[in-house]
Image: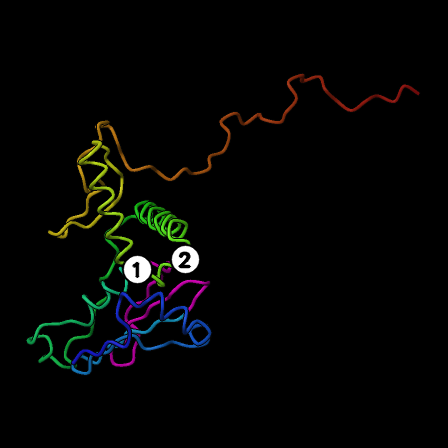
């Protein structure tokens, strides 16, 4: 039987309410008595940090930024480790849990998703002149508003937004509505530092340069 101590939509409220406890210990988020699986969360470097225990041994750990990413990660952990079929439940202790919950998004895609979510939350706070929770708007509600806004931009103005998104069929797309007019669009690449090509950089061009002579 699955017991949810915290629902995915409650992550932010739970974080704020239990932050002092999370800084000191792991708190139980969900458990399944039939499969002996437990999901815990703690605070690490200012962010939520999840772990999955199977028979009291950690089989998976994952960090997330507070907000939509934490909601997504927690949902994925529940889906992968917590909710199993009846046949799987009958297996008992026979098969250990496997670590296979990698995010479908690249690091650059996650940065873009975070930027959009944070911008949307800031916009709503300014618009409403109050915290979102006071209006009953949760993380999933912010995501839904962004989705509807992007749909309106495309339908009314033909504007396509780069926003990595998981479609209903489980596939990942960079553009939920339409395709960019520039077919050469590609995901931005990480810029890496490279040494200057001119190895003589810093050397004087005049090879006759030397120490000043003592005229005395």
Instruction: Residue under label 1, please give it.
Output: 137
Marks 1 and 2, the one that precedes in the sequence: 2
Q: Is residue 203 above or below residue 164?
A: above
Q: Position of residue 58 (x, y in %)?
A: 31, 74
Q: Which residues are magenta?
A: 43-70
Q: Residue placed at 54% from the left, 27% from the top? A: 199
**Where on the picture, by quarter, is residue 152?**
top left
- Residue at horizontal 20 percent and vertical 41 percent from the top: 151
Quadrant location of residue 202? top right
Q: Residue at x 66, y 21 (%)?
A: 204
Label 2 crowd (10 A; few <14 / some 14-19 / many >=20): few
Quarter occupied by residue 89? bottom left
Give the residue number, with chain letter if any, for mark 2.
130
How much space separates mark 1 and mark 2, taking CA atoms?
11 Å
Callout 1: SS? loop
In this view, 122 is above or below 139: above
Dot 2: what SS?
A: loop
């Amino acid at each position: 039987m699955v017991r949810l101590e915290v629902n995915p939509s409650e992550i932010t409220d739970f974080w704020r309410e239990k932050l002092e406890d999370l800084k000191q210990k792991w708190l139980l988020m969900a458990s399944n008595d039939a499969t002996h699986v437990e999901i815990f969360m703690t605070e690490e470097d200012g962010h939520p940090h999840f772990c999955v225990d199977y028979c009291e041994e950690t089989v998976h750990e994952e960090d997330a930024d507070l907000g939509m990413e934490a909601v997504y990660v927690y949902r994925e952990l529940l889906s992968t480790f917590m909710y199993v079929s009846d046949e799987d439940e009958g297996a008992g202790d026979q098969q250990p849990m496997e670590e296979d919950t990698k995010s479908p998004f690249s690091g650059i895609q996650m940065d873009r998703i975070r930027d959009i979510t944070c911008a949307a939350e800031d916009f709503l706070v300014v618009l409403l002149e109050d915290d979102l929770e006071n209006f009953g708007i949760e993380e999933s509600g912010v995501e839904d508003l962004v989705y509807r806004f992007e749909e309106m931009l495309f339908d009314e103005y033909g504007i396509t937004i780069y926003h990595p998104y998981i479609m209903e069929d489980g596939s990942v797309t960079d553009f939920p509505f339409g395709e960019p007019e520039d077919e050469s669009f590609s995901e931005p690449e990480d810029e890496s530092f490279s040494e200057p090509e001119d190895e003589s950089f810093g050397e004087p061009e005049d090879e006759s340069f030397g120490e000043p002579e003592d005229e005395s």
